[in-house]
């Protein structure tokens, strides 16, 4: 996502990963010494490190750094936060959007932090159900609130590439707490606001 800082890599980690990736290339019957593949182990190692950078971020601290007192009690919604993750069963990408809503109870969080929380949980080996639940838990735990709702819509390459899923289908997962759990009216209001029905 919008992380413009150039990552600093642990060279030892890159080299270790690269040696394994080179072995995989060989096991697949390819020639790792041909021109196009010469630098692939290092590039793929760095891509893997980038795509799992969530392991080295602390989402609790991300939120706690940006809490502000707030008197209103109307729902706050950030919708269609783009994410890219890796399915933990096949290490193939799944990607889509996350929409978050919460009912403040005395405080709010800087909006960009919600996207950072999504990234911290997406950039690791994941399943969509846990991604959705963990984002909801982190927000519910760190911001004073009367309810949190998270909806995740994603496409899974492990299903699409292997022909298990129809090309255009999307998987939707939902997690909610507090008043979003007890009030179907509030829930429906949220779904309407994020246009969930388009799928
Ligand atoms: Zn999978």
Image (tube, helix red, strand yellow):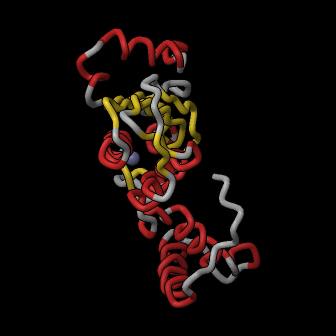
* Residue 92 visible from this viewpoint: no
Q: In front: 170, or 131?
A: 131
Residue 81 percent across, percent down from the top left? 57, 38
Q: In front: 53, or 166?
A: 53
* Residue 103 visible from this viewpoint: yes
Q: Residue at x 56, y 42 (%)?
A: 111
Quarter of the image for residue 148 reads top left
Quarter of the image for residue 135 reads top left
Residue 178 percent across, percent down from the top left? 26, 28
- Residue 24, compared with residue 67, is above or below; it is below
Q: In front: 113, or 3?
A: 113
Q: Residue at x 41, y 50 (%)?
A: 87
Q: Residue at x 51, y 41 (%)?
A: 161
Q: In front: 14, or 197?
A: 197
- Residue 126, compared with residue 10, is above or below; it is above
Residue 53 percent across, percent down from the top left? 50, 66
Residue placed furthest toward the right: 35
- Residue 19, compared with residue 153, is above or below; it is below
């Amino acid at each position: 996502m919008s992380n413009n800082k150039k990552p600093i890599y642990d060279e030892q980690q890159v080299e270790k990963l690269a040696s394994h990736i080179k072995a995989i290339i060989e096991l697949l019957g390819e020639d790792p010494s041909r021109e196009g593949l010469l630098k692939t182990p290092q590039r793929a190692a760095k891509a893997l490190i980038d795509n799992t950078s969530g392991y080295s971020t602390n989402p609790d601290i991300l939120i706690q750094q940006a809490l502000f007192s707030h008197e209103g009690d109307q729902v706050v919604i950030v919708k269609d936060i783009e994410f890219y993750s890796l399915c933990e069963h096949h290490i193939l990408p799944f990607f889509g959007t996350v929409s978050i809503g919460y009912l403040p109870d005395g405080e709010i969080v800087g909006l960009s932090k919600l996207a950072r929380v999504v990234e911290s949980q997406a950039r690791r080996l994941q399943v969509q159900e846990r991604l959705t639940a963990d984002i909801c838990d982190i927000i519910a735990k760190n911001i004073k609130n009367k309810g949190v709702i998270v909806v995740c819509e994603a496409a899974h390459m492990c299903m699409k590439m292997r022909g298990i899923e129809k090309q255009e289908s999307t998987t939707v997962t939902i997690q909610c707490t507090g008043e979003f759990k007890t009030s179907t009216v509030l829930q429906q209001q949220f779904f309407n606001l994020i246009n969930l029905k388009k799928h």
